[in-house]
Image (cartoon, helix red, strand yellow):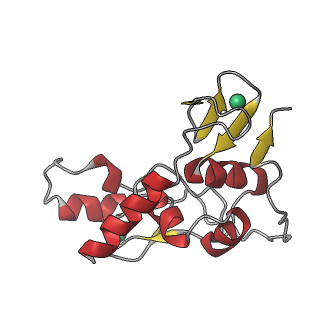
Amino acid sequence: MEKETKDLEKLLISNKPVMCEKCKGKLFYKGGGRYECNSCDYFVLDDFGKIKVFLEENGPTPMLIISQATGVEYEIIERYLRKGRLEIPEGSKYYLDCEKCGCSIRYGKYCPDCIKQVAGGIKAVFHEELGERPKHVYNTNMTGKMHYMKGKRGKKD
Ligand SMILES: [Zn+2]
Ligand SMILES: [Zn+2]
């Protein structure tokens, strides 16, 4: 397990774009997983950005499909969700499971109830482990609105 975690860390770092593919200029992080070139109109999304944009464009989607559509490893997507950097949108049919009781959460590791138990009433909990339950679990009719992400590497409009 220990080794796996380290490899994943390496993978995350190696996937960070640093150089403009068009003019070899330096890329600057603009937030939300988006990197922009200072000297031309090139921009690129890192794994985090790809997942984020995909969720914005496609709405709630099973992680496996996000992985196939964005080319981002399943483990990386789950890691971002578990770390609370990404949230599964409200109304999704697909959520993460609380690692303790198995109820649905949108991000993090544990649901708010289990966090209280895990922490034994003390509020010394890593923020990133705290999840949030979906407010309503809708019976959404997924209309298969799935298309491959356009312009994940490309020009600005
Ligand atoms: Zn450039
Ligand atoms: Zn729980």
Q: Nearer the viewer, residue 136 or 20?
A: 20
- Quick check: can you spot residue 28? yes
Quadrant in which the C terminus appears: top right
Instruction: Pinpoint residue 59: horizontal percent, then vertical percent.
Output: 73, 57
110 relative position to 123: left or right: right
Residue under the image location 19 percent in, 64 percent down: 118
Q: Quadrant of ligand 1?
A: top right
Instruction: Pinpoint residue 71: horizontal percent, then vertical percent.
Output: 66, 66
Q: Nearer the viewer, residue 145 or 141?
A: 145
50 is higher (above) or lower (below) than 4: above
Instruction: Pinpoint residue 74: horizontal percent, then vertical percent.
Output: 55, 71
Residue under the image location 63 percent in, 75 percent down: 64
Residue under the image location 54 percent in, 53 percent down: 87
- Quick check: can you spot residue 100? no
Instruction: Pinpoint residue 4: horizontal percent, then vertical percent.
Output: 34, 74
Instruction: Report which quarter residue 47 is drawn in.
Output: bottom right
Residue under the image location 68 percent in, 54 percent down: 55
